[in-house]
Image (spheres, rainbow, N blue to C red):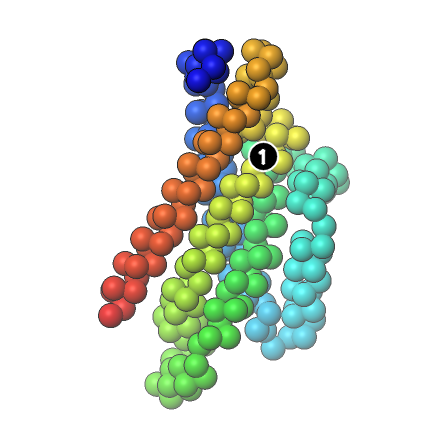
Amino acid sequence: MDLQFLEIIPLTGPMLWGALNTIYVGLLACGVGLLIGTGLLFLRNSQFWLLRILVGIYGSFIRGTPALVQILVLYYALAPLIGLNIGPFTAGILAIGFNSGAYVAEILRGGLSRIPPGQWEAAKALGLPNHKIWLKVILPQVFYSVIPLLVGEFTMVIKLTPLLSTITLVELTRSSQMLYNETFRPVEVLVIAAVIYFIICFSISQYGERLQRRSHKYRL
């Protein structure tokens, strides 16, 4: 191995802190996305046609525009336009969360389509109100059925976090840029960053598989 490559490794402390910040931002953004996606699922099944149309427009807009543009619009245009003074950390979490929410809603919609109609009929026959049917009967089954897809969405959120370096949020990519500007060794630094990203995403996927096995065992 190149000795100059080994010389970079002791200097990667800021990158590790950036990686922790990446995970932290990713977790918060996933939480926002999960809340938004669940809310969109409810609205999509609303009896009001206008709400269903608005949900469709929101999903089409998110899926039809680049995530980078969404981040820049939220941070530089939308937030000042409505009078909000938010920093890059909050703006990044909201932007990625809003983006993820549209995809989570589609994932949950697919899970909802797998629920047999008999589940609804049985719950209504027991006299359960709609909110209890959703919370205690439908949603647990929906989330269980889409665990692998939600884990995949989480890895996609992690892969979106490098875009936040454009609004000066110090995460792994931004930390890497600062390090290779200081050391003038971009190849080595970016290789290390790629390895760290791989470790994060691989760990998430392995945890998702373990979670699915445990859920399946519990159901059995």
Question: Which residue is located at x 38 percent, y 52 percent?
Answer: 208
User: Foreground: 170 or 123?
Assistant: 170
Question: Which residue is located at x 58 percent, y 68 percent?
Answer: 43
User: Foreground: 175 or 135?
Assistant: 175
Which image quarter holds the N terminus?
A: top left
Residue 14 position, x and y percent, is: 47, 19
Q: Is residue 147 above or below residue 166?
A: below
Q: Secondary structure at mark 1?
A: helix
Q: Is residue 114 above or below residue 169?
A: below
Count neighbours of disc 1 (C-alpha within 10 A) and say few if under 14, some if 14 to 19, many if 20 or more.
some
Q: Is residue 154 above or below residue 105?
A: above
Question: Which residue is located at x 42 percent, y 72 percent?
Answer: 138
Q: In the picture, residue 121 is in which quadrant?
A: bottom left
Q: Amino acid type of disc 1?
A: Pro
Residue 13 position, x and y percent, is: 43, 18
175 left or right, relative to 141: right
User: Foreground: 13 or 134?
Assistant: 13
The tally of labels here is: 1
The residue that disc 1 covers is 162
Question: Which residue is located at x 69 percent, y 69 percent?
Answer: 53
Q: Please indicate, yes or no, whether residue 132 appears anywhere in the rendered image.
A: no
Q: Please indicate, yes or no, whether residue 71 appears anywhere in the rendered image.
A: yes
Residue 28 position, x and y percent, is: 48, 43
User: Foreground: 137 or 166?
Assistant: 166
Residue 220 position, x and y percent, is: 24, 70
